[in-house]
Amino acid sequence: MKPLGPIPPGFGAVDGELCIGDVPVSALVARAGGTPLFVYSAEMIRRRVADLRQAMPDSLAIHYAIKANPYQPILQLLSELIDGFDIASGGELTMVRAAGIDPALVSFAGPGKRDSELEAAIAAGVTLNLESEGEAERALVISGRLGITPKLAIRVNPDFDLKGSGMKMGGGAKPFGVDAERVPALAKRIIAAGAEWRGFHIFAGSQALDADAIAETQAQTLGLAARLADASGAVLPHCNLGGGFGIPYFPGDEVLDIASIGARLGKQFASLPPELADTKFCIELGRYLVGEAGVYLTRIIDRKISHGEVFLVVDGGLHHQLAASGNFGTVVRRNYPSAIASRFGAAVEEEASIVGCLCTPLDRLAEKGGFPRADVGDIAAIFCAGAYGASASPAAFLGQGPALEMLV
């Protein structure tokens, strides 16, 4: 049998059935109108933010990168809990505005911003994290035409990356940000043009579980911010320290020690160099805030045996949970946390693979895992589905369409 990833804490059972927010999944499925269904726990999100607040320095703001999950009820919930939102497209700007979020709390990063996106962001009062000198010039031209003072920051491509991160966003040649050595000249150009100078966005990597690596990267980021601020000759009003906080997906993954990260960052804040004395800092997190709070529920529609192997065929698949299938950036496929929700906590009785309804061998949500016996009508659960699930998967593939979603 291939091991399954660790199920996040906070999930219980009633009469042998998985519960989310104290409600059995069968009742949630009935309420939603069927499967496949993403269910997100509001209480788990609240608890995650509260734990993070307790661990981090009081002066550190918390931002949410909505690319992790832009579901409107989650955005509205987080608007009550955190300090800002980070977007990466004009479409995401529309989403945050539809959720009633003040554009003044929003920053916009990402390469390849179209002129129409720049114009919408400038008009709304969003902070632009500029990815290149060319983008800066386009933003200045557009703001001049609109007669609006733009809020401009620079996304820095640092000369280091986050060790052990799932995706390295900095160091070396990257499509993201302005190479560190070119940042001071661009900052001077922005300030001289009369823009509202908003500082730096420095993001070195994501999905790291090593607290020492994250703390070291934060220290390097503060050092780089101080050097660039000094070279730019201007007060640095704000610095986004990036994120990188990971969650356990796979067998052997350990829970991130945020208390250690917060303690070390607090010591850094207590001895900041003069260049950063008046700077406000934030971290930008996505999956860490919402990933473990989500469960993907999908009903078994066929049980079949082929060459002695058991296949549990479900009505969902990689078109909703691309990452769980192993096709979202992983090199070696490993099993996400998975369970038979209708027999949650029951003893392992067989080796089985949970496979989707798509006509491709890539559509495997769990491969040769140990499960209690499951039959047609039972519900399978894929955990850690709160981030990079519904909105990061090819829902239109083979005409299958999107999954249902609910926040409970």
Image (spheres, rainbow, N blue to C red):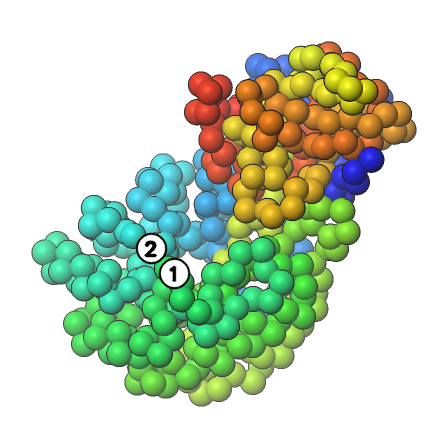
- What is the crowding at mark 2: few (fewer than 14 residues within 10 Å), some, or many (at least 20)? some
**Quarter of the image where one finds residue 54:** bottom right
In the figure, is residue 200 to the left or right of 344? left
Kindly check if marks 1 and 2 are in contact, taking CB atoms under 8 A apart as contact.
Answer: yes
> Would you place residue 207 above or below residue 364 in this image?
below
Task: Find residue 339 and report its horizontal and vertical position in percent.
Answer: 76, 30
Residue 113 appears in the rendering: yes
Q: How many marks?
A: 2
Residue 385 horizontal/vertical position (percent): 61, 37
Query: Can residue 7 be seen in the rendering of this structure?
Result: no
SS assignment at label 2: loop
Q: Amino acid at mark 1?
A: Phe
Q: Depth check: give the residue in front, 318 or 268.
A: 318
Corner quadrant of residue 311: top right
Reading the image, the residue beneath label 1 is 176
Q: Name the spot of residue 368 as percent of width and height, x first.
A: 77, 31
Q: Residue furthest front?
A: 307
Q: Residue at x 71, y 46 (%)?
A: 250
Tell me if mark 1 has few (under 14), some (14-19) or many (20+) residues whose alpha carbon lies within 10 angstroms of its own. many
Residue 88: image x %, image y %?
38, 49
| Residue found 60% across the figure and 27% down from its top | 361
User: What residue does disc 2 label?
Assistant: 111
The image shows residue 319, relative to residue 286, as above or below, that is above
Quarter placement of the C terminus: top right
Secondary structure beneath disc 1? Answer: loop
> CA separation, marks 1 and 2?
6 Å
**Amino acid type at mark 2:** Pro
Residue at 74%, 42% in the rendered image = 5
Q: Nearer the viewer, residue 288 or 319?
A: 319
Question: Of residues 45 and 304, which is closer to you in this image?
Answer: 304
